[in-house]
Amino acid sequence: MAPPRMKTAGEPMRSRSPQDPADIVGEWPDGGAAAAERAIARARATQPWWAALSAHERSGALGAAAERVAADAGTLAGLMVREVGKPADEAATEVQRTIAILRYYAQAAFDADGETFPAVDGRSWLFARHRPRGVVGLITPWNFPVAIPVWKAAPALAWGNAVVLKPARHAMACAIRLVELLGLPDGVVEIVRGGHAAGSRLVARGDIDAVSFTGSTDTGRNLAVAAARGGIAFQGEMGGSNASILFDDADLERAAAMIASAAMTFAGQKCTATSRVVVVGDVGRACEALVAAVEAMTVGDPAAPDVSVGPMISEVARDVVTGAISRAVSAGAQVIAGGHPLKGLGWFVAPTLIRDVEPDAELAQEEVFGPICAVLAARDENEAAQIVDSTRFGLIASVFTGDLDRAISFADRLRVGMVRVNAPTTGVDFHVPFGGTRASSVGPREQGRAAREFYTTTTTVTVSPSR
Ligand code: ADP
């Protein structure tokens, strides 16, 4: 795949395979702010044409995009394995999810586009109609290289917007291939091959109507401030420090397997990964079950069919995890599984469980974004809830219990955007509202029908009789 040459605005961007960093998956000139600006201009020029198509035509285009992705599913998943080190079965699942999202929004193009209201004067006709915002910018991370761009782009397109996509450097080859497969006209979907300057440009001038971001909390908050200054609608999905609460009436082995999977698969590099297990009951027994579940996982080449834990995305990311492990150990915590990098070509870290972590310790408070999970003890339900809510994040929590009353009360009291009962924190359905509270999210929810709140604006119309 040879990207077109363009005037460079900086150093070339390189994407390397994390399991074999000598394997350069792609190299692109960084188009910088100028590339973003040109993309916005093309999208601006094309959007009225796209919005004026019938719902039937937009639906047809999204449906055809789904079929093109489906026809290329194996190759796209293979590229994802190579570029970001996602284990093969998860990459295949992500492509299937992407296809399902495109099909879902192909149908959503036919949803009712407004509401009618009784008028106060009893004579007029009042309705509020959802209309496209215009041009929307999407700034996406590398960890879900096709699903995240599509769960933002598909609703935006279904409801008549044009899209400017600024993917992450580490997943640029996947994004370029995805946009080729979508097969939508230039100006309807524009891709910007650029780094931070290109991303910042999207929110800099107020010449775009909305920006949806997924990535780190600091970046998201900075972009949100810039967007607010420019009068741009902004939505950000950011960090998490997600807890699984394990009660002693849960099916321990089953819960431990789900927690291990939520913490460690794809080397824990998901914003919904479990990074804390809060145990109410016998901590020793819980640790034994968790260690057994983690040690049953296979670490290695993500292309191999039995591997569920691949490499970390980069050397820097690997060093963040090993640094966090050594600081936790110095603070008195105990490594009960893993705890060290693995020899090999790429950036592998053994899946790591650490117990005796204090609730206010770095590992329990900050997002480390790797195959690492802290085990914390709570005396009772109240303390467990307090620990879960003690971080600045509020994305998702899981509750493992056989007691329905307890599950319901936890779902009500936790200050998080999503709660799952007897299910892992990862793997949230694509058609339900997605998002968190506090430092985890800003703006309206993503996914499903909820996405319409962000990608449309309403016009309220009052029609009164002419005499
Ligand atoms: P991650 O750790 O998941 O890569 P980041 O927040 O660093 O999270 O990156 C998410 C997306 O935001 C990427 O597309 C990245 O290029 C972009 N990005 C990162 N920093 C900036 C910035 N300062 N301004 C604009 N975009 C940025």
Image (cartoon, grey):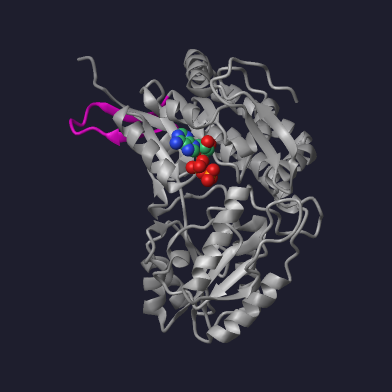
Judged from this view, the residue extending furthest toward the left is 121
Image quadrant in which the C terminus is located:
top left
The residue positioned 24% from the left and 21% from the top of the image is: 464
Q: Is residue 444 among the parts visible in the rendering?
A: no
Percent across and percent down for residue 164 are: 52, 26
The residue positioned 44% from the left and 64% from the top of the image is: 362
Q: Nearer the viewer, residue 84 or 271?
A: 84
Q: How many marks?
A: 0
Image quadrant where residue 27 sits: top right
Percent across and percent down for residue 149 are: 57, 36
Image quadrant where residue 460 sits: top left
Up/down of 59 relative to 214, above or below? above
The residue positioned 68% from the left and 33% from the top of the image is: 173
Magenta stretch encompasses residue 115: yes
Image quadrant in which the N terminus is located:
top right
Q: Nearer the viewer, residue 110 or 407?
A: 407
Q: Which residues are magenta?
A: 112-133
In the image, 110: left or right of 412?
A: right
Q: Is residue 187 among the parts visible in the rendering?
A: yes
Percent across and percent down for residue 136 are: 46, 28
Q: Nearer the viewer, residue 362 or 447?
A: 362
Magenta stretch encompasses residue 150: no
Image quadrant where residue 75 sits: top right
Percent across and percent down for residue 141 are: 55, 41
